[in-house]
Each structure stands twice: as C-alpha cells, then as structure tokens.
Amino acid sequence: MPHFNSAHSPAIRYVCRLIIAMAVIASRGSLAAQTPVAAAQQPVQKEDAKSGRYWTTRWEFENVDIDKLAGRLKSIGIDLGLHLRGTATVKLDVGIPLTSLRDGAAYRFDGTLTSPGLVIDDVELKDFETSISYRNGLATLTRLKSRVGTQDRQASGSIEGSGSLQLVPRGDATAEIKINNIALSPVSDLIAKFLPSQNGLLPDAGRLSGDIRFRAPIDRISEMEAYELAGKVNGQGLKLASLPPADVNIGNLTIEDGRLKFGGLDLMAAPSNLEPSGIRLIGRADVPLGGQGEFSFELVGDDLPLGAIARLSSRPAQRTTPAVVDGKLDFRVRGSGVLAPETEQSTWSIDGSVASPSLQVAGVDLGVLEHTIRFTPNQFDVLPRRDETTLPTSFTLVKFRSKYSITSEALTLESLTATAFGGQISGTATVPRDGDGDLVVGLTIADIRPNVRIPVLGRIAPTATASIAGNIDWRVPIDKLLDPNQHAGTATLSVSEIRINEEGIGELVAELVARQGELALQANGDLFGGTVKVRTIANMMTTDRWSDVMSRLGQSVFRFEHMSINPLVDLSLGRRVGLTGDVSGDIIVDFDSQPTDRTNLKVKVSVELSDVNYRSRLLSRKLTLNGRLEEGVFVVQPLLGDYANGSLRLDGRVYLFDRDETFRPRAELRLVASRIQLDRGLWFLGQKAERIQGRISTKATITGRQESVRIRGSLHGRELAAYDLPIGVARGALVATANLKSWNWDLSIPSVRSSVGGGQLDGELHLSSGRRGGIDMTSRWKTRRVDVFRLTHPFGRSSSLATGEVTGEMSLGGKSIRSVDDLAGRFDFQLGRTRGAAIPGLIAASQFLGPVSLAGQTFDVGEAKGIIGQGVVVIDEFWLGADNALVRADGKLYLRSGRLDMIALIATGDYRDIAANLSQLAQKYALRSLLPASAIFSVTELFRDRTVVIAVLGTTQNPIVRLRPIETFREEAARFLLREGQRLVLAGTSLGVLNGLDGGS
C-alpha cells in the first residue's frame, strides 16, 4: 500500500505558508526599524520597563525593499523559506523597553504595513495591507487582505483574514482566512516545485475559494502532520490535461493529531462536447499524514473517462496518441486498514464494485463490466455480480482470482485463474520488490477468444477474433524489462478460427524463443485461403530497447502461396473493393552489419498475382512483381504481365521515407501499356469506367506521393468514347493527377486529333472526379467533314437529325455527370452533302408537297446551331439548302427518349416569277435587326403557295408529321426565306440553278 505524507497536501501547505509569510513580514518589519533608512522620529515619553517606562517613538518607512528585509530577518534566525520581491510601506508606533533591550518579547509596536505589489514564490499579491500589533512576543495581524492574480481587479482573486505568530519564545502560527476566486495556475506552479514528477497531474486552469482555520508550530511549518486545520474549499472550472473542466467541493476538511480527514468530496464535470454524459466523483477519507496508522476511505465515481485519465500518466509528447485503455467506468470502493512502515506488515481490506458498458485495453475489447472487487494483503478478486451461468455474451471478462504473498524481497503470485473471452488463463509470477532479482512469469492460456480492433487506412476499424491457446514461460531481471537482450523464455501460441468482421481467415501456430540476446520467431499457418510460413531472428545488442527489435532482424523469410487478395485489399483499404484473385511469393528481409537505421533495411520481393478479377470481369491472368528494397528505396524490376486484355510493364523506384525518416512513399515509375481496354483497366472508377470505352496504348511516368500522384505521357487510342462522346482514333499528350487517400483524380488530354465518321476531329478533353459523385467533364471540339450520324449515334439513336458532313465547333461538358441528362454544351456546324432521306419526318412530309419528293434529295449547304442541357438539344436554327428546296427547323430533341418537338418550314417550287419581288424585299430589309410586321406579311404572301409548315413530333425512330396552317410566318422564318431564297436566285443566275427550277435539264 502507498504511504501518505505531507507532500499529498501541498495546496493546503501553500496557503498556510502564504499567510505565515505575510504575517512574519509584517510583524518583523518594525524590529528591523532599529536601523531605518529614512524615518520620522516623534518621541512621546520615557518609561522604565520594570516600572512600565518605555521609550515610545513613531517610525515611518516608504518603499522598503522586502528582499533586504527578509535577509535581515534571516540574519537574526528567522528564515521564511520563501523567495520574496517587492517593496512595502511601514507605519509603526514603537515601544522600546529601556532596561530590556535584549528581550525581544518586551518590545511593543502597533501600526500598518501596505504594499502595491509583493511576489512570494512567484505568486503575485496586489494591494496588500494589514494592521499589526506586537505584545509579549506575540505578533497579531488583523484586517489582512490582498488581491491575488492579474492586474484586472475583476479577474483577480483575494485573500482576507487575520492571524498571529508566537515569535518569542518560538511558538505557533494561527490564521483564519477567507480565499475568494484565486487562480489555480500559480498554485499548481508552486506545488510543482515540491513535486516536480507530478507536474503533468496538476490543474492548469480553474479558481479556488474557501474558508480555512489552522494552527501549526512555526518550527514545523513544512510538516503537515503537525497542523491543526479546519475548513472547506471549493474550486470552479478545474482543467486537468484533456479532462473536461470540473467543479469540486471539499467540506469538513480537518487536520488533527497528524490525520487528514474530509467528509465531503464532490467533483462534477458538466456534460460537454468532450463528455456528453458528464463526470461525477464523490468520497470521504481519513488517512495518516505521516504514512503510518489507521486509514479509511470511500470513493464513488460516475462515467470516468479512462482514456483521458490514462493519458495523464503518459509522457506529454504521447498524450495526443490513443490511450492503452479506453472507455468509461462507474465504481464504488471503500476500504480501511492499518499502514505500517513495511508493506508486508500493513493490513487492509478494500471492497467495491465496478461497471462499464464497454472497456478496451490495448485494442482488446473487454466487453461489459458489472463486477465486485475484493483486495486484501493476500488476495485480489474480481467477480461478477450476477450468476456466472446466466451471464450474456457481452461479458467477456467473467472472473479473476489471485492469491499472493508479500515479503520484503518479492511479491509472489501463488495462483492466478481467470475466466475471460470464453476461455481460461492461469499461472504464477514472482515480482522482486527491491529492484534486484528476476521477474518470473508462467502462464497457460486455454481457448480464449478476444476481439481486437485492427487499425487500417479506412475510417471504420475492422474487428478480428480468434481462438488462442498456449504457454508462456518467461524470465527477466526486474530492472532490465526494457532490455530485450536480457529476456529469456518461450512463448508458444496456437491461433485458430481467425475471423475478421465475421469472415473466416484461417489459423496460425507461432513460437517465440528468447535466449542469450537472440529473439527467434517461427510461424506456420493457413491464412486467406493459402499457406504462410515465417522465419525470423533478431540478434539484440546490450544497448538495445524494444523499439530496436525491427532493426536487429537478421534474414527473415515470409513465404505465402495462393492467398486470396480479396480480404487483403478490403482490409488494407477499410472497405469492400471487389477484387479477387490469388497471390503467391517470397519476401526476404535482411540486414547487414547490424544497422541502426531502418532505411538500411534490405528486402527482396518476388510476387505473382494470378486470375485477378474485378466483379467477375477478368483484369489479368498473370502479373509478376520482382523488386528489392535498399537504403529506403524500393526498386521495381519490373511489374510485368497482361492487363485488361492488353499488356503492362511498370518499373522504377519508390522512395519510402522523407528527409525526416518519416514513412511517406514517393514514386518515380515508368509505365508502358499496350491495347488496354479502358472500361476494364479503369475498374477503380467503379461504374463510371463503363462510360469510357475503347483501347489505349501509352507510355507515361508516374511520380509523387499518395496524396498527389502525377502521370505524364502520350497515348494512342482506338475506338475511343467518353460519356457517349465519340473520339474514334486519337493521339495526344496525357496529364493526370490523383489523390489515393481521397480517391479524387483529374485527367487532361490537352490535344486530341482523331478520325471519326470519315472526317477529322480535333480538340481537348478534361475529366475529373465529381464532388457529388459522377465525373466532371470539359471538352472543346472542331470538326472537319465529320458524318453527323457518328456524333449523334452514341446518344442511343439509330438515326439522327441529319446525316452528312459537318464542319464546325462544339463544346460539351458538365458537373458530376452520371447520364446524358447532366451534359451541357453548344454547337455551331456548317452542313454539307446531307441526304434528305435521313432527316426525321422529311419523307413523311412529302405527302404535303405534291409531286415533289425530297427522299433522294441531297442538300449541299446548311447550318445547325443550338445548345445542349438537362438532356435536351435545343435547336436554335437548322436549315438545309438545295437547288430546288429549302428546309428550316427549330425546336427540341430529348436525348434520353429521342422525342421530337419541332416546327419545320419546307419551301419548294419555281422562284422565277417571284425573283424580282424577293430581291426587292431582301435589299430593303437586309440591314434591319428586326423585321417590321409589314415585311413579315409581305414574305408570307410571297411564299404562301410555295411553302409548307409542319410540326414534327414522335421520336427520331418514328416521327409524326402534322401539317400546320400558314397564317403569318414567324420573324425567324421570314428572315430565313429572305436570306436563303435570294441566295438561291443569285446562285441560279450564275450557276444555272434557275434553269433547274424552271424544269430544264
């Protein structure tokens, strides 16, 4: 059992010493006035000491140096034991005994001491003041008060009260003080001076208030067991490391006869973001301050965060890492006994209960706790509160029993039996107490099945379970626990029925042997559907620690055959990917000359992947990887095989560590791929890959780190299409980036030249991962004599708005594209050699044209302009011109369904009789931005008998044509007829087209 001593109450001693220091300063200030620096003497009268005669005078000192005053006090035998700084003003009426100058008790003085600022052991006191009276060796302080803390009066705390010091002869110090809202940070700083090893366990924020009354011998002021004390203390907003702020009240606090007692400890942290349920701790205690005697205590805790508490005992640099123990704990513990100078002579009995909904230790889930605790000098038991036979499966720890004995030399664990994780653990141990001797452990494990959370790259850590059985026989000098070369023993474990997230993995048998500085590990098993063999030896040096084990490995061989890659990939990435296949190979790890730097690790890798599939689609029949790791660089030499119905070769280097020797891989690789089928090769894009078609060959370099991979090279593709946009045969540069942590990517082909539809397509294409899923796309294209049918066919139609040659420009793109409904763009094409038979609805319109048939008509000129968005092609203007016909249309084409909603105008016939009128109208309104109504009416009358207006409905596959009556042309139609009708008349004049219109041959 630990001993209690005065160091356990440094906060109480701090407050007491603070008051005593102020009292001593005030009371001794007048005695030092016998050698004043500057004084105003005002003699009053003379009285003999024996007959009551004194020499009475008044002394006044301003800005006396407190440090010098403390030095004078020390020179006459009064050592305050505190570092003092500051100045004070003293005003005193002094009575000097004429016949007893050497008798300090015979002096008298009354007055005041004030100071604008005193610093006592780095605790700053502001506006300090007190009244002083000294009679018969007793200094009495009244109306003592001071601010403590910052310059801000509202933020600083205060001390008020009174006290006394029996200075001659040496006696007791007494005080009654009221503490109001004192900041705890300076208190913690002072306590850290007494207990430097506990600096991290002290509050770094909060405020303290209370009432304290005490008495203590001045000569024993540092011994808390000599105090007589009573009072109550409360704190607000106490902040300790990562624990949430808490309020604490300690009532009925007393120290008497060397014992510390408090009857009401109440600590409570309100619910917060850190601890939504809050924390509560209440208790009482009666303990000997000297560390010997009877003791008793009772403590109740509610929702204690064990992870935050465990981190308090770790090094400051490690407090941001996950704690070894985690979870919340409720408990009620009471104990009593007698503490003796030697632990083996002490007696105690501690009983209690603990409860937790879930507790983890080193990643192992201990499940639900609802247990009682019994702790005596020879027994420690943890037993379930329920009947063992009715415990639910959530109780992984059923019971723990141990018997032990304590001597001056060692703690001997005579028997340990535990029922946990569905199995049994039993054993013995010997632990030396004096720091000399061997720690000896013997454990037998029988069919336990713990749950362990595995850290992976994904957000959700999978849970591994296995049945474990084995024996551990181990010995190590107690003072050499951290020295692996001093350990000796054998640990044999059989791990069967290994499961990760309820999926069977296999079984493994391992043996670890330590002897004469050598650690040897052998393991054999069946894992992930294949076989595994491990052989490794570490030769430790006398100066090594456990962290050096990996760097001391000799040649280690890890051999595996026909292991399934599916669970390996899913486990590594923390999510289901859908890759299947087998992997076999050897990994040989070797060190030369006992290296001390992990970057000197040498590894040879030979791995073969076979029958790799992604969701039942074959990716590769065989891929082989040969490589080596030297000086922190993995050399790929090479990765070679078939991939996505093509071939693949990858070689280069991967630098595993940065300049700070932090594991941060950086690649410099060269990729040569031939005829890769894109919808298979880009499997990692998921269903998006199905929208990227064709075959591609490329030579590229791959550089960068996991969060920023860059790919640069050239590509040659055939039968290419991206999101229903045909690209055909293409050549161009390739620039891509990817973040393998977030799976964001970006692909740019800044210059594409391809052949499609018998023509040429030039442009640029940019693809990237969409923020809301899908793909972001930007593309710009220039066409030259490309068949319109080839451009519109990918939208799912077997025919299109037109067939023939187009030359012009088109832009197409979108954000988070998942279908054609997400595409947006513009087009502006010049049309040529367009056959009328392929224009939806034009053949059906022939029924309204009389003897004129446009089915075999070839239109030599034309234009198509419009926009694409929300799954609709909005045709602003579409027109075609031939020697005997004009066709104009506008409206909408719905891409997903192929539905049409268009109005078309068809003009046919002989133009000779209207040539003059048409020419006159065209010249008159050629420069008009808007046609007047009279012009539109004139054009309507001129063309009424030569023009048919139809509505084209239905779909591109089955258009429905309906004749519409001509009342008055729309302005767009009238302007078109003026422009293109006049062009035909002029062209006919120069090329003989008018003869054709007249019916000539």
Image (cartoon, rainbow, N blue to C red):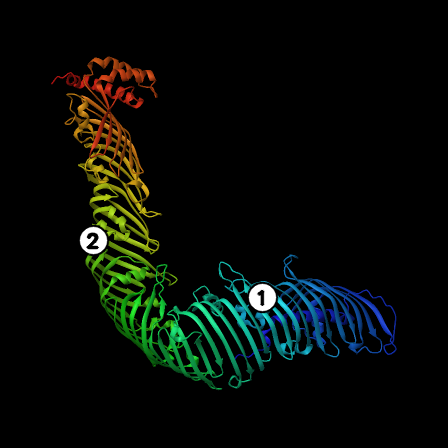
Name the quadrant containing residue 382.
Answer: bottom left
Amino acid on which the number 2 mark rests in the picture: Ala
- Residue 854 versus residue 401: which sits nearer the camera? 401
What x and y, as percent, mark residue 267? 56, 66
Can residue 411 be seen by looking at this rendering? no
- Residue 386 versus residue 284: which sits nearer the camera? 386
Classify 10 Å Cα crowding around label 2: few (below 14), some (14-19), many (20 and above): many
- Residue 118 versus residue 469: which sits nearer the camera? 469
* C-alpha gap between disc 1 and disc 2: 68 Å
Classify 10 Å Cα crowding around label 1: few (below 14), some (14-19), many (20 and above): many
Residue at the spot 17% in from the left edge and 28% down from the top edge: 843
Q: Earlier in the sequence, mark 1 or mark 2?
A: 1
Residue at the spot 60% in from the left edge and 78% down from the top edge: 289
Which residue matches tag 1? 248
- Helix, strand or loop status at disc 1: strand
Which residue matches tag 2? 644
**Marks 1, 2: nearer the viewer:** 1
What x and y, as percent, mark residue 675? 19, 50
- Residue 984 versus residue 598: which sits nearer the camera? 984
